């Protein structure tokens, strides 16, 4: 569910799109799969000189995405007394869409508790 939410949110990124709409896409997908109550944070944020720049991909955001911005898309689900999952991609917004600059492995790793 988290991997697909990440994919859907990422594919919607382009100049002119609102930060809120990206959050809506990931949040709605997670909610449709009955995990909405466990997604208690924003979908992502800006990256720059600091790891957390002011732009938020969140329900409250009024920001519009622009070419040259760098953002994270990082939906997650955290279930109390069980565990959680979050996947993060770092993304550059380009003239025609986006470029994922994260090059990490996508294999699922389960760490026993």
Image (cartoon, rainbow, N blue to C red):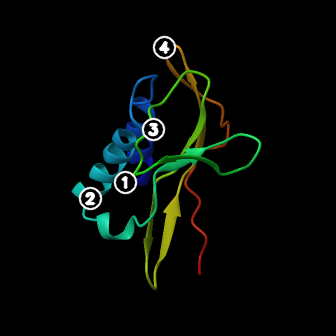
Question: Going 46% across and 53% down the picture, which residue do you hit?
Answer: 75
What residue sits right under mark 3 in the picture? 63
* CA gap, disc 4 and disc 3: 18 Å
Foreground tag (2 vs 3): 3
Question: Going 77% across and 42% down the picture, which residue do you hit?
Answer: 49
User: Please, what secondary structure does the residue beneath circle 2 have?
Assistant: helix
What residue sits right under mark 1 in the picture? 1
* CA gap, disc 2 and disc 3: 23 Å
Q: Position of residue 73 (x, y in %)?
A: 51, 44
* Nearest the eye: 10 or 95: 95
User: Please, what secondary structure does the residue beneath circle 1 have?
Assistant: loop
Q: Quadrant of the N terminus?
A: bottom left
- The answer to which quarter of the image holds residue 7 is top left
Q: Quadrant of the C terminus?
A: bottom right
Question: Is residue 100 found left or right of 26 in the rendered image?
Answer: right
User: Please, what secondary structure does the residue beneath circle 4 have?
Assistant: loop
Specify which label sits upstream in the sequence, 1 or 4. 1
Q: Is residue 26 visible?
A: yes
Q: Residue furthest bottom?
A: 81
* CA gap, disc 2 and disc 4: 29 Å
* CA gap, disc 3 and disc 1: 26 Å
Q: Position of residue 91 (x, y in %)?
A: 59, 33
Specify which label sits upstream in the sequence, 2 or 4. 2
Q: How many marks?
A: 4
Specify which label sits upstream in the sequence, 2 or 3. 2
Q: Residue furthest front?
A: 62
Question: Going 51% across and 48% down the picture, which residue do you hit?
Answer: 56
Q: Residue furthest right?
A: 49
């Amino acid at each position: 569910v988290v991997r697909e939410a990440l994919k859907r949110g990422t594919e919607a990124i382009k100049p002119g799109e609102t930060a809120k709409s990206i959050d809506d896409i990931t949040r709605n997908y997670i909610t449709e799969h009955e995990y909405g109550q466990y997604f208690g944070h924003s979908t992502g944020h800006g990256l720059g000189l600091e790891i957390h720049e002011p732009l938020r991909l969140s329900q409250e955001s009024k920001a519009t995405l622009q070419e040259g911005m760098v953002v994270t898309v990082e939906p997650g689900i955290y279930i109390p007394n069980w565990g959680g999952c979050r996947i993060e991609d770092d993304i550059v917004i380009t003239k025609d869409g986006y470029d994922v600059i994260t090059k990490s492995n996508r294999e699922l790793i389960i760490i026993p508790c």
